[in-house]
Amino acid sequence: MAPEIFLNKPKAITTAIDVWALGVILFCMLYGCLPFEGKLKNEIIMAIKNKFIRYPDIARELHISKEANDLIDKIFTIDYKERIKVN
């Protein structure tokens, strides 16, 4: 869930939410797990708010490119106005 959804920013309902969702999919495809972890919904929300991305233990062995990691970082920008855009 993009942070603007649980932060109740109705004006933020833009394609930035779709970019966030694509970031989750990309992360899952590259690393084989979800980027934010928690047993309870509030734990996951806190992980998202703090941009605490959970990279798997084998991340170094996967040889994910610097460019892919840079893209993930730009996608998971908390402020939707600063998040990478899709043109």
Image: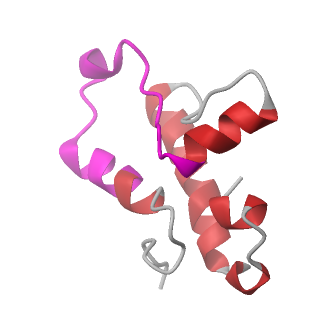
Residue 58 colored in magenta in the image? yes
Q: Name the foreground residue: 79 vs 68.
A: 79
Residue 65 placement, left or right of 68:
left
Residue 66 in percent (x, y) is at 20, 44
Identified at 68% across, 25% down, the residue is 38
The image quarter containing residue 14 is: bottom right
Magenta range is 49-72
Q: Is residue 41 above or below residue 18?
A: above
Residue 27 in percent (x, y) is at 49, 40
Residue 30 colored in magenta in the image? no
Residue 34 placement, left or right of 31:
right
Visual colour scheme: secondary structure
Number of marks in picture: 0
Identified at 66% across, 68% down, the residue is 17
Q: Name the foreground residue: 30 vs 16.
A: 16
Q: Name the foreground residue: 6 vs 27.
A: 6
The image quarter containing residue 28 is: top right
Identified at 47% across, 56% down, the residue is 76
Residue 34 in percent (x, y) is at 59, 32
